Image: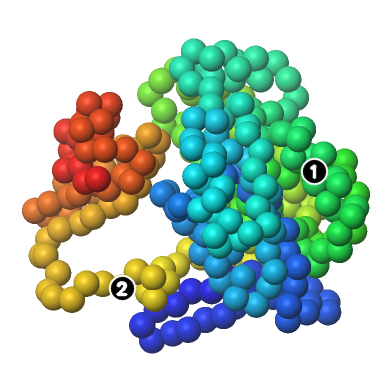
Amino acid sequence: MGVKSRNVDIESDTLNGMNFAGTPDHMKILFVTPYVPSPPTFGGQRRIHGLMRALSKRHALSLLALHNPIDPIDEWRERTRGFYPDTELFVQPAFGLQGRAKRTAQLRSLFGLRSWDAISHRNEAMVSRLRERLARETWDAVVVEFAQMTVNLTGLPRGVPCVVDEHNVEYDLQRRSATSSSNPLRRTFLEANWRKLRREELAVWRTFDGVSVTSPRDLAIVQAHAPQARCVLSPNGVDLDEFTPPPGAPEPDTVIFSARTTIFQTRTACAFCSPISGRSFWLHDRRCSCASSVRCRPRISSRCNLLT
């Protein structure tokens, strides 16, 4: 993705970095994502938003995205179409599962061959639309965000280069979470699920035309298991044209951490950072109000100041 700093302006696209033969300067690219990139309120959205904004400077982009039914679909569709007019959303009921309903669905998945990730990201309406658009239109590339989203391309004819953008090596995250989780039910589920997810993820690396990863560690994992894969390192970055520091001296010994408070990785980060951050550690979650954060996330609010 195009990454800018004060002294460096890099226009090294993920796709061009893979050196596809005959890659044109202006391409027609189809993005397939598990959520819309705008408004970017958490890390995954921010990465997709940054990547698509950088690519849209020289290429024509279209977007097919899943959507959580609990989020405002009309508002998010219009916000995204402000950047990418050719946007289609598909409501994914599995994303809206919570509590006992979600745990029951995850338990059932243990008795099947597919990972919960593949099951929860498969959307038949999206598959049908992909089949239609891949057959009817000419594309230069298809970019799939997250390996689990590639389940929607299974069985479809592919006459166009397909790239998977790995925000993480997903099976490795689950494997490490399984070893550190204190919840025996969660640990049992992850131990079974990460092995199925590993098989699926390795198959993607070995069959897709390109793989993009965010860290040297993830790059080494892909190269070890799929040495023939065309893999590039595309680290996350900050566009300082969009995120310009305000004038004046920064407040000393203060850290502002912007993240979703609904995921356990945020709690882990708070537990690690707050004792070493100095005077103040502020947690910013744009998806909820300060009051609801204090009420619903006591393990976070006990360690951090909460911002809206």
Question: Across the whole image, how many numbered discs are drawn on residues?
Answer: 2
Residue 21 % position (x, y): 83, 77
Q: Are marks 1 and 2 in contact (CB under 8 Å)?
A: no
Residue beneath disc 1: 129
Please report the residue visible at 28 percent of the width from the left and 52 percent of the height from the top. Answer: 257
In the rendered structure, the answer to whether residue 88 lies left or right of residue 298 reads right
- In the image shown, does 56 or 164 lie closer to the viewer? 56
Residue 119 in the image: state x and y as whole percent.
69, 29
Determine crowd level at label 1: few under 14, some 14-19, many 20+ residues with C-alpha closer than 10 A. some
Residue 270 position in % (x across, y down): 26, 43
The residue at the point 56 percent across, 47 percent down is: 77
Determine the residue located farthest toward the bottom in the rendered image: 7
The first of marks 1 and 2 along the sequence is: 1
Location of residue 101 (image quadrant):
top right
Question: Can residue 159 be seen here?
Answer: yes
User: Image quadrant of residue 61?
Assistant: bottom right
Report whether residue 231 is seen: no
In the picture, the quarter occupied by the N terminus is: bottom right
Is residue 166 placed above or below 35 in the rendered structure?
below
Residue 80 falls in image quadrant: bottom right
**Which mark's residue is nearer the viewer, 1 or 2?**
1
Label drawn at residue 244: 2
Query: SS class of the residue under badge 2?
Result: loop
Q: As displayed, is residue 129 above or below residue 227?
A: above
Q: Amino acid at mark 2?
A: Thr
Nearest the viewer among 134 and 147 is 134
Residue at image coords 56%, 71%: 54
Q: Position of residue 259 (x, y in %)?
A: 35, 47
| Disc 1, SS | helix
Q: Is residue 235 above or below residue 34?
A: below
> What's under tag 1, amino acid-wise?
Arg
Could you give the CA–CA distance between mark 1 and mark 2, rounded to whole angstroms?
Answer: 39 Å
